[in-house]
Image (cartoon, rainbow, N blue to C red):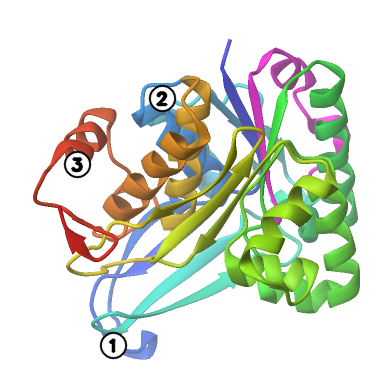
Amino acid sequence: MSKFVTFGETMVLFEAATQGRLRYVPSFLKKIGGAESNVAIALTKLGHSATWFGKVSDDEMGHYVVREVKAEGVDTECVTYTTDAPTALYIKEHRREEELAVYYYRHDSAGSTLTKEDLAYEKIADASILHVTGITPLLSDSCYEAVLAGIQCAKEHGTFVSFDPNLRFALIHKLGEEVARQRLVTIAAQADLILPGLDEAKWLFGDMEEQDYLTKGIELGARKVVIKNGGDYSLFKDEQGTGKVNSFRVKQVVDPVGAGDGFAAGVLAGLLEKKSLEESVRMGAAVGALVIGVKGDIEGLPTRKEVDAFLCDDNKVYGGVSR
C-alpha cells in the first residue's frame, strides 16, 4: 500500500541542450515532467511509497513517460492508455544564463481525456494522503470531474487531501478566469492542506494581508495552510498555531521549474512522519532549495540523506543569514 497517491498529466520534456533561442538550438535532451508525478518521485526519494496514475497515449511517448516514472520507484500500475490522443509535450528554452522559457503542447492531449472512470479508487481509499493540483481540473471538464470524484473518495475513506494550486495561466486564459477560479476555490474548500504561493493566494482569494490568507484557508475548511512567498519565507497555520519559516538561500538558480513540487513533497513527507507543520515546512524549504540547483524537473530532487545533511549543515545560508 502506498502512503501517498496522486494523479494528473505527465508530459515528455525536450530541454534545449545549449543556450540561445530555440531556432538556433541543434539538439535536445529528452526527459519527463509533471507536477503530480514530480511530487510522487520526490516522496520516493525521501523514503516514502508513492502511487501516480494518469492517462497517456498508447505509443512510444506514452510508454516512455510511464517507464521513467516507474524507474524512480513510483507505483504506476493504474495508468491508463488511449489511442485517441497524443501524450503532451513541453520544451524548455535556455535563452541565456538564468533566463528560462517554457512552451507547452498539451491541447487535446491524452492526459486531458482522463475521466472519473479512470481513477484508481482503491489506491485513494488505502492511502494516507491524496495530493491534487490546480493543473488537472483545468485541462478539461472530465478532468475536473475526476478530481472532484477523487477527493470525494478520499473524504469517504479518511484520506488526507493536499491541494497545490500550481497555477498555469495558459490553461486559465483558455478556460476563462472566472470558471478557472471557481473550480480551484471549490477544490480548495475540500482540501485538508492548501499550499499556494502568495501570488496564487491573491489570485484565488483577492487582495489581502498575508496573514489573512492563512485565516481564509482555515475558514474554507482546511486543517493546515501554507503560504509560500517565493524564495524568501513561508507562512503556516494549523490547530497548533501560526508561524513563519525562512527560505534557504542558494548561490545560483539553475532551473526553478519543479521547486514548488519539491517544496510540496518535503511538507508532505514531514506530515507522513507525524512532524509538526513547522518542521514539515522547513523540510519543504530544504527540498526546494536543493532542486533549483540542477536542470530538469526531477533530476535535482534530493534523497533523504541529502536533505538531512543539508539541514544539519552549519554553513548553509538560512533566511539570508549565515548560520
Q: Earlier along the polypeptide chain: callout 3 or callout 2?
A: 2
Question: Looking at the picture, does residue 131 appear above or below residue 208?
Answer: above
Q: Is residue 166 left or right of residue 306?
A: right
Give the quarter of the figure containing the N terminus: top right
**Which is more toward the observer, 265 or 171?**
265
Q: From the image, tell me which residue sits under label 3.
A: 310
The residue shown at (63%, 34%) is 6
Res 161 → quadrant? top right
Asked if the magenta segment contains residue 11, the reply would be no
Q: From the image, tell me which residue sits under label 2.
A: 73
Q: Is residue 280 in sight in this rendering?
A: yes
Question: Looking at the picture, does residue 108 appear above or below residue 2?
Answer: below
Q: CA distance from mark 2 to mark 1?
A: 35 Å
The residue shown at (78%, 29%) is 119
Q: In the rendering, at what x and y percent does residue 169 appear?
A: 68, 75
Q: Is residue 176 in sight in this rendering?
A: no
Q: Bounds of the magenta span?
A: 114-135
For the residue labelled by badge 3, is the local secondary structure a helix, a strand or a loop?
Answer: helix
The residue shown at (88%, 30%) is 152
Q: Earlier along the polypeptide chain: callout 3 or callout 1?
A: 1
Type of amino acid under label 2: Gly
